[in-house]
Image: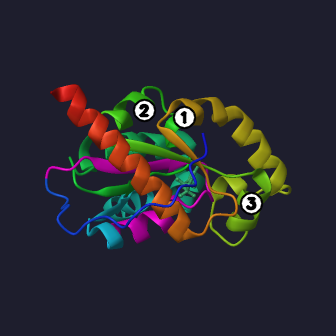
C-alpha cells in the first residue's frame, strides 16, 4: 500500500480546468492540510479544506461547534460541505479526519475526485497533533484516544482511496507519491471512459 516513489514534477501544461479534484482523507495529523497546501501551490490549483470551509461558513470554530452542538452537528456540517460547498473539479481538497465516519461518505468522496488516504502511526499522529486544537483529543490520555479512534476508523480509511504511509516522509516526498497516484488514477479514468 505505501507509495514512496519519486517522479518528475507536474508539467506546466497540466492545468486544473476539467481535471478531477484531488481529495485527501485520513486521520488527524496525517498531513492532509499541510501537503494539500503544498500540492495546490505546485500544481497551481485552488486549495480547499473542509474544516476551514465549515468555520468560514458558520463563522464558528470547530471546537465551539463540538462543545456547544456536539459531534453529530459537526458531522452534519461536513455532509453539507461535501454535498453543497465542494468545488466540482480542479481543486485540491483536504477533509477533516473523521469525515469517513458518516454513512455513505466514502462513495460520495470517490464520486467527486481522486481520493488519497494518508496513514501514520499513533506515535507520529500524537507528535503532530500535540499542539493543535482537536476537540476529540482533549482527553487525559490523547495517545490512547488516538489508538482507540484509529482502530475504530481504520477499516473505513483502508477502503477509501489509495493509501500512503506518511511516517518519515517529507512534505516534498509525500507530494511526489501523491502526484504519481493522481496521474495513475486519472489515466485509468480516461481509459475507462474510452
Ligand atoms: C476530526 C478531525 C479534525 C476536525 C475535527 C474532527 C476527527 O480535522 O475535523 O476536529 O473526527 O478526526 P483534522 O483531521 O484536519 O485534524
Which is more N-terminal, label 3 or label 2? 2
Given residues 62 and 11, the one toward you in this image is: 11
Residue at image position (62%, 66%) is: 133
Residue 98, quarter of the rendered image: top right
Which is more N-terminal, label 3 or label 1? 1
Q: Is residue 13 left or right of residue 133?
A: left
Q: Which residue is mark 3?
A: 124
Q: CA distance from mark 1 to mark 3?
A: 22 Å
Circles 1 and 3 in contact, beta carbons < 8 Å: no
Expressed as whole percent of the image width and height from the top left, the position of residue 64 reads 54, 60
Please state the extent of the stretch shown in magenta in the rendering: 18-40
Circles 2 and 1 in contact, beta carbons < 8 Å: yes
Expressed as whole percent of the image width and height from the top left, the position of residue 86 reads 27, 49
Circles 2 and 3 in contact, beta carbons < 8 Å: no
Q: Which residue is mark 1?
A: 101
Indicate yes or no: mark 1 CB to ligand 1 under 8 Å. Answer: yes
Q: CA distance from mark 2 to mark 3?
A: 26 Å
Disc 1 is placed on an element classified as helix
On screen, residue 183 above or below 148: below
Amino acid at each position: 500500500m505505501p507509495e514512496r516513489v519519486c517522479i518528475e514534477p507536474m508539467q506546466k501544461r497540466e492545468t486544473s480546468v476539467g481535471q478531477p479534484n484531488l481529495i485527501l482523507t485520513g486521520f488527524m495529523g496525517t498531513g492532509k492540510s499541510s501537503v494539500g497546501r503544498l500540492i495546490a501551490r505546485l500544481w497551481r490549483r485552488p486549495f480547499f479544506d473542509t474544516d476551514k470551509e465549515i468555520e468560514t461558513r458558520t463563522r464558528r470554530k470547530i471546537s465551539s461547534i463540538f462543545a456547544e452542538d456536539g459531534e453529530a452537528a459537526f458531522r452534519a456540517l461536513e455532509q453539507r460541505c461535501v454535498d453543497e460547498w465542494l468545488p466540482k473539479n480542479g481543486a485540491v481538497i483536504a477533509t477533516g479526519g473523521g469525515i469517513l465516519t458518516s454513512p455513505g461518505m466514502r462513495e460520495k468522496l470517490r464520486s467527486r475526485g481522486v481520493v488519497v488516504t494518508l496513514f501514520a502511526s499513533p506515535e507520529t499522529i500524537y507528535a503532530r497533533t500535540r499542539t493543535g486544537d482537536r476537540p476529540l483529543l482533549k482527553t487525559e490520555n490523547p495517545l490512547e484516544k488516538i489508538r482507540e479512534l484509529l482502530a475504530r476508523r481504520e477499516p473505513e480509511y483502508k477502503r477509501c482511496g489509495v493509501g500512503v504511509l506518511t511516517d518519515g516522509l517529507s512534505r516534498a516526498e509525500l507530494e511526489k507519491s501523491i502526484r504519481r497516484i493522481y496521474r495513475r488514477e486519472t489515466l485509468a479514468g480516461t481509459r475507462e471512459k474510452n
